[in-house]
Amino acid sequence: MADTDTEQSRSPKRRRIENYDGTYEGTPRYSSPDELAGTPDQNRYSEPRSATFRRDPPTERRDRSYPGSSLEREESPDELDHTAPIIAGQETEEEDEEYESEEDEERDDDGSATPVPTRVRTPIPEKQEAVFVPYRPRAVLRGHKRGVAAVRFSPDGKMIGSCSADASIRVWDTASGKCIGILEGHLAGISTLAWSPDSKTIASGSDDKSIRLWDVSTGKAYPHPLRGHHNYISTLCFSPKGNMLVSGSYDEAVFLWDVRTGRIMRSLPAHSDPVGGVDFVRDGTLIVSCAGDGLIRVWDTMSGQCLRTLVHEDNAAVQSVRFSPNGKYVLAWTLDGCVRLWDYVEGRCLKTYQGHANAKYGLAGAFGVYGGRSWERGKKAFVVSGSEDGGILWWDVVSKDVLQRVDGHEGVVLGVDTWEGDESGLVVSCGLDKTIRIWERDEQRDEAMPDGVDADPDAMVD
């Protein structure tokens, strides 16, 4: 083992972590599981250290310098500072050749001196400030006979699913706004729906106390509904892999289902009031739930253990909850007219967004981004939500400023969802006025669909 360590210490990479006293230390055998969790001991390896080079005395040619010229040795202007300073008199052979060529060219045949060429540095472009581009109406989708309780984009963004108190689910084509399918089979109104990650299956929860899974391509329900709750189904969410489904109900329980077998994997005695919302974190290891008892609870998916309980001092009923896209925060809608952003690890409320009306209905919203396309850096995040006065509001996540407010629905806006594509950003909303409305960023204008066009409710597949 000692021989192995000695061999490793002789390698160029091992010399880079030589201590000032001439001793060597090995790098940690295991890296931190946190991708950002560097330790002070690890950071010291990047500190500058002295070095001694045994070289022949520099010749007169090698000692040449040009005061005030950009040929003087400087540190790299790159923000990562990946180029180490070059000590005078210790240039590489390649640079010696460069100097030799410059020396040959600096005098003409008649012996007159010519200016020494200078290096031109390319300036680092400044970061552009993210600018919020307002959303404008794209289409109004009509077809439901009663109020629309929830609306969701499919994960691929090609379809929109909506459910209503008329006991039906409608599937819409995002591009054209046409209804491409009607799913019927529940015996009572439908309060919630969820898409599977592959966009091929829809799960719906109804006041008939059952959960049904639907094949979107055929429009038919799976043979056996999921039964187990003793009251209305209020909220659903698929796991990121699509193999599990979490549900919340007015019976105050949260169930975790095995989608393949249709059986309950785990029952969580979650709350003392009807459950308003549930969600999976991005890797599926955590579940968050909320209820009218004012509690937000974070659960371990596999063990069913409650890891954290969040409660605001006002103890307002919590009606909807969502994890942030990075999985670090939880966004909650409460009946005191607030949307709150929580750091669930530390157990504290970070931001409170206000300006909408919410005192009676369970509203739902979503996160989104602005200031660039999906792959570009420098983007900022927003929160969007409906309001009981018919409005839709966008807030900047960090500053809490209201970025935009639009009034399109007549009455309560119950659900809002977002979808961010490579070239477009869309928002969809629904409400008690029986309509679904699609909103798009102004810069991504689709001239094929004029403002507020009514999609044909009768254009559907059998």
Image (cartoon, helix red, strand yellow):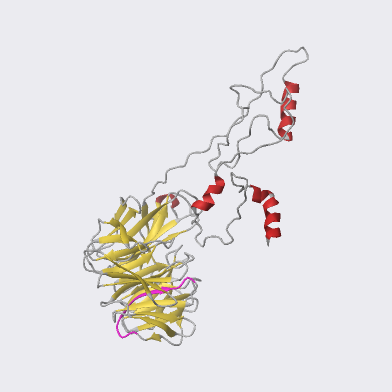
312 or 201, which is in the foreground? Answer: 312
Quadrant of res 161: bottom left
Figure label count: 0
- Counting from the top left corner in percent of width and height, residue 148 is at 32, 71
- Counting from the top left corner in percent of width and height, residue 252 is at 29, 79
Which residue lies at the image location 70% right of the left edge and 15% below the top edge? Answer: 113
- Counting from the top left corner in percent of width and height, residue 396 is at 34, 52
55 left or right of 72 in image: right
58 left or right of 372 in image: right
> In the current view of this chain or complex, which residue is farthest to the right?
109
124 shown above or below 39: above
- Part of the protein shown in magenta: 229-240
| In the image, residue 233 lies in the stretch drawn in magenta | yes
**Residue 139 in view in this figure:** no
457 or 36, which is in the foreground? Answer: 36
**Residue 333 in view in this figure:** yes
148 shown above or below 55: below
Quadrant of res 250: bottom left
127 shown above or below 5: above
419 left or right of 91 in image: left
- Counting from the top left corner in percent of width and height, residue 193 is at 38, 74
38 or 302, which is in the foreground? Answer: 38
Which residue lies at the image location 37% right of the left edge and 77% below the top edge? Answer: 247
Which residue lies at the image location 55% right of the left edge and 60% below the top edge? Answer: 31
| In the image, residue 244 lies in the stretch drawn in magenta | no
28 or 201, which is in the foreground? Answer: 28
